Amino acid sequence: MTEDTKTIYYNNGQLKFEVYKDDSGTHKNEWYKDGQIKFKKLNDPLVGVFDNSGKKFYIYEWHENGQKKKRYSSDESMVIWYENGQKKEEWFADNDVKKTFTQTKWYEDGTLSQIIKQSNDELDSLIETYHPNGKIKSKLWKYLIPPSRSDSWKKFGTDQEFWDKDGN
């Protein structure tokens, strides 16, 4: 650590919070009272996107039982886990190609629950929802209708399909 390190302790002497600076920026760590890691923010020169200070970063969080809880990075990606370790949600953006965004969700048992894909350039999106048994439940498409010469505002169209839990 450096002389720029700031720390806070619990009454039992366990480290609760720590902030320190180095050449890559400001780092933050937080622990539960029993010493289990709770939160970590790292500036990382290899990530590719920057925070307000111009530094790239990752943020990590853990459940009290030690399982991963959340990982967020400044490249607009995030993963969230249930306490049992199963993945709950995953988000990522592909800003280099078409400014697309994808969010995937799972039930607590790991079965796929929902996928959302959206293109910000075209304002098109697709939402697929699944029953707990893994069969498709619904699809919703939202799309931009090109304006006619007399229209000065954007119009959207939608299409939907639905299935029962048996796939019918």
Image (cartoon, helix red, strand yellow):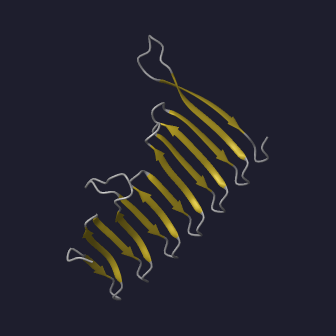
Extreme bottom residue here?
Answer: 12
Residue 51 appears at what percent x and percent y? 31, 54
Q: Residue at x 40, y 81 (%)?
A: 33
Q: Does residue 105 lie above or below 109 as drawn?
A: above
Q: Answer left or right for 161 relative to 51.
A: right
Q: Does residue 148 lie above or below 48 as drawn?
A: above
Q: Nearer the viewer, residue 125 or 43?
A: 43
Looking at the rendered structure, the number of numbered marks drawn on it comes to 0
Residue 129 appears at what percent x and percent y? 64, 45
**Rendered-image quadrant of the C terminus:** top right
Residue 159 appears at what percent x and percent y? 63, 30
Q: Does residue 93 lie above or below 109 as drawn?
A: above
Extreme front residue here?
Answer: 46
Please tell me in which quadrant of the rendered image residue 58 appears. Answer: bottom left
Q: Does residue 45 lie above or below 28 as drawn?
A: above
Q: Answer left or right for 91 relative to 159.
A: left
Q: Residue at x 63, y 43 (%)?
A: 128
Extreme top residue here?
Answer: 150
Q: Nearer the viewer, residue 96 or 142?
A: 96
Q: Residue at x 64, y 52 (%)?
A: 113
**Rendered-image quadrant of the N terminus:** bottom left
Residue 77 appears at what percent x and percent y? 46, 53
